Amino acid sequence: MGTTTPHPSGSTPLGAAHRTYRHLRYPSIACALAALLGGCAMVQLPRLADDTPPAWQNTSASEAKAPAPDLRGWWKAFNDPELDRLVDQALSGNLTIAQAALRIDAARTLADHRYAGFLPQFGVHTLNEPAPDSSASYFQMGFDTKWELGLFGRSTGHSRVVAGDLGIAESDRQAARVSVVAEVARSYVELRGAQRRQGLLEQLAADARDKVGLTETRVRLRLASANDLARARVEQASAEAALYEPRLAVVQSRQKLGVLLGKIEPDAALVGAGTQPELGDLRIASAPADLLRTRPEIRRAESEVLKAAGELGLARAELYPRLGLGGSLTYSARVIGRTRLSDADGIVTFGPAIDIPLFDWGARKAAADARDAELSASVLTYRQAVLEGIAEAETAMAALERQRERIAALGRGLAGVEHAAATTGTLRRLGLADGFDRVTSTAALVQARLEIAQAEQERNIAFIALYKALGGAPLPHAEPAD
């Protein structure tokens, strides 16, 4: 009898891949015979260990009690209709998603015919090869049929391989949808953030120009030196040079969005400046075990285990005989010369077809052992996918929380700068402050707002990274949610 495939400790079943196989089982008498005759060749599906912790480590108690996150429409938390429109266009027009959908169609086509190789096959052939120097030749036509029963785990193994390929294709499509939605949201956030930085840096450049003008006036009045004017001009050049970064970022973000939407030209609606998306006081409540059903990388690893189990079953089946039924009807006629057709003869044959492997220097046994090792490796790959998913989600949660704290600290600093700017404005109206005081306080205020804008953009990106790690994306319309 064959050995049981080793598997890690735990009692969690194979999950989605196992359920897929369960719906693909062959409902024929041949399958029952396979279970009876090839029980020792059947491969038991490994039970995948659930290595997820009971709760996240980087969430607060209030988040643990919050409602479950909306993984199918998470980007709507930004309350930005433009972003909603871009995501809808990307889901329908992205070329990577379209490629993945076609690969699913291909896998489903094969899945629909997964048992064709274990059903009766019919064919027809002819044979007419006269020799040039012969006085007679023969014409032959026949019908052939064969039926391999798929015993000793062949049918089950083939079904698992096909189901695994289909699960892999479906997981790849969902992974593409997750990635595209996250990249569209990230590119849009970066676009609006760059436009906001550009506006603030233009204010700094304008203040720097004003400072140069004020310094020139002071130099003429002998209230400032030439060195003061040179420093003011250096500050102006630095402020104007800083504008190149957000301007380039705007172009890059628009081009990236065009590719994500499957368009040659960037969306014309993104040319004008818009407001930066803002998040409210959000709470993320989910359990690490939820990744097992939402993260496509884990679902793909499940399908890889199912496929590896099927390939091991096929390799073990090669150690046993191939059993089937076969028959033929052959019609033969002798052609005399070029004109006369002699009496025709027909031959009918029918009976069992048996192919028994005897000796191959251990090649088939080595192939089965290799597939066994690959199955064990696929189980470890699944566990690795779970660990990586948890680590990515934990990191994103920690980044989101740290960015929230950073924004709160910068907000307190901004309040102080705004108070100082308001005081300077009051003093200037009273004639107690000059233009230099105004330029200095305005520059400090703009700089503080720049830091806030950058922190808010990074918080938005951390939020996007979290939902990408959780596997958040809408399912195709043809498939119900889990």
Image (tube, grey):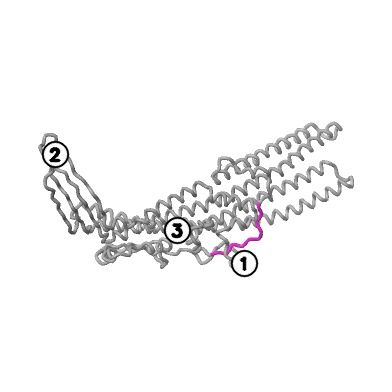
Q: Quadrant of residue 233?
A: top right
Mark number displayed over residue 62: 1
On the rendered structure, is 222 left or right of 2? right
On the rendered structure, is 115 left or right of 193? left
Q: Residue lying furthest front in this view?
A: 339
Amino acid of disc 2? Thr
Q: Residue at x 62, y 51 (%)?
A: 83
Front-lying residue, 167 or 420: 167
Q: Residue at x 66, y 59 (%)?
A: 280
Residue 279 highlighted magenta (yes or no): yes
Q: For mark 2, what is the residue? A: 339
Amino acid of disc 3? Arg
> Total number of numbered labels?
3
Disc 2 vs disc 1: Cβ atoms closer than 8 Å? no
Q: Quadrant of residue 34?
A: bottom left
Give the magenta-colored segment's residue range. 277-286
> Would you call the spot at circle 2 few (<14 residues within 10 Å), some (14-19), or many (20 or more)?
few
Residue 318 highlighted magenta (yes or no): no
Query: Closer to us: mark 1 or mark 3?
Result: 3
Report whether residue 392 is seen: yes
The x, y position of residue 377, in whole percent, is 37, 56
Front-lying residue, 7 or 93: 93
- The relative height of residue 428 versus residue 298 in the rendered view (above or below) is above
Mark number displayed over residue 299: 3
Earlier-in-chain disc, 1 versus 3 = 1
Mark pair 2, 3: CA separation: 69 Å
Q: Secondary structure at mark 1?
A: helix
